[in-house]
Image (cartoon, grey):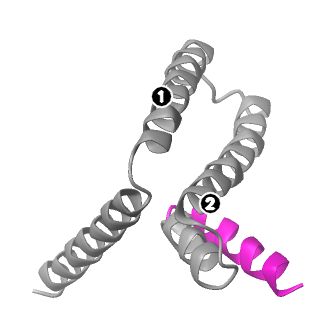
């Protein structure tokens, strides 16, 4: 039950653009003991499903450029296929370190932007 609640809360954060995907990966790896690659794949599926629902909502409101959606879908699928093969060929610790580094950089940028706003 707690997994459903945490997933729901993280999906709300993702919907607001807060970066819930990083939180979801941390939750999956630290609390559910998923491997890093499995957590990243699960996060992609989670993100894709939430994106589909958002797409349907925007399509209903007629705020969709169909050509852009088709182009982004094609390149998204190509990128997924290419990088999933690359992920299987590299050491599993590399994605973990890259993700950790990106989260640290993102946090530092957020702190710097907060300091600049307060001045």
Side (left or right) of 119 relative to 78: left
The CA distance from mark 2 to mark 1 is 23 Å
Image quadrant in which the N terminus is located: bottom right
Magenta stretch mostly in which secondary structure?
helix
| Residue 63 position in % (x across, y down) | 64, 30
| Residue 11 position in % (x across, y down) | 68, 66
Q: Which residue lies furthest to the right in this view?
A: 1
The magenta stretch spans which residues? 1-17
Give the residue drawn at x 82%, y 87%: 2
Kind of element beneath mark 1 = helix
Front one among 50 and 63:
50
Front one among 42 and 69:
42
Give the residue drawn at x 63%, y 58%: 38
Toward which corner of the image does residue 26 lie, by quadrant?
bottom right
Q: Is residue 17 above or below residue 4?
A: above
Is 111 part of what is drawn in magenta? Answer: no
| Residue 109 position in % (x across, y down) | 21, 71
Sooner in the amino-acid sequence: mark 2 or mark 1: 2
| Residue 8 position in % (x across, y down) | 76, 72
Front one among 70 and 88:
88
Image quadrant in which the C terminus is located: bottom left
Is 2 part of what is drawn in magenta? Answer: yes
Give the residue drawn at x 34%, y 58%: 94
Q: In this view, does 91 lie above or below 68?
A: below
Q: Which residue lies furthest to the top in this view?
A: 67
- Name the mark on residue 79: 1
Toward which corner of the image does residue 98 lie, by quadrant?
bottom left
């Amino acid at each position: 039950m707690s997994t459903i609640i945490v997933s729901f809360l993280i999906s709300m954060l993702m919907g607001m653009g807060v970066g819930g995907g990083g939180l979801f990966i941390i939750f999956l790896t630290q609390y559910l003991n998923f491997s890093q690659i499995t957590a990243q794949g699960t996060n992609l599926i989670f993100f894709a499903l939430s994106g589909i629902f958002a797409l349907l909502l925007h399509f209903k409101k007629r705020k969709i450029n169909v050509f852009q959606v088709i182009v982004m879908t094609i390149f998204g699928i190509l990128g997924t296929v290419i990088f999933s093969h690359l992920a299987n060929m590299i050491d599993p610790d590399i994605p973990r370190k890259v993700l950790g580094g990106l989260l640290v950089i993102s946090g530092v940028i957020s702190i710097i932007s907060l300091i600049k706003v307060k001045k």
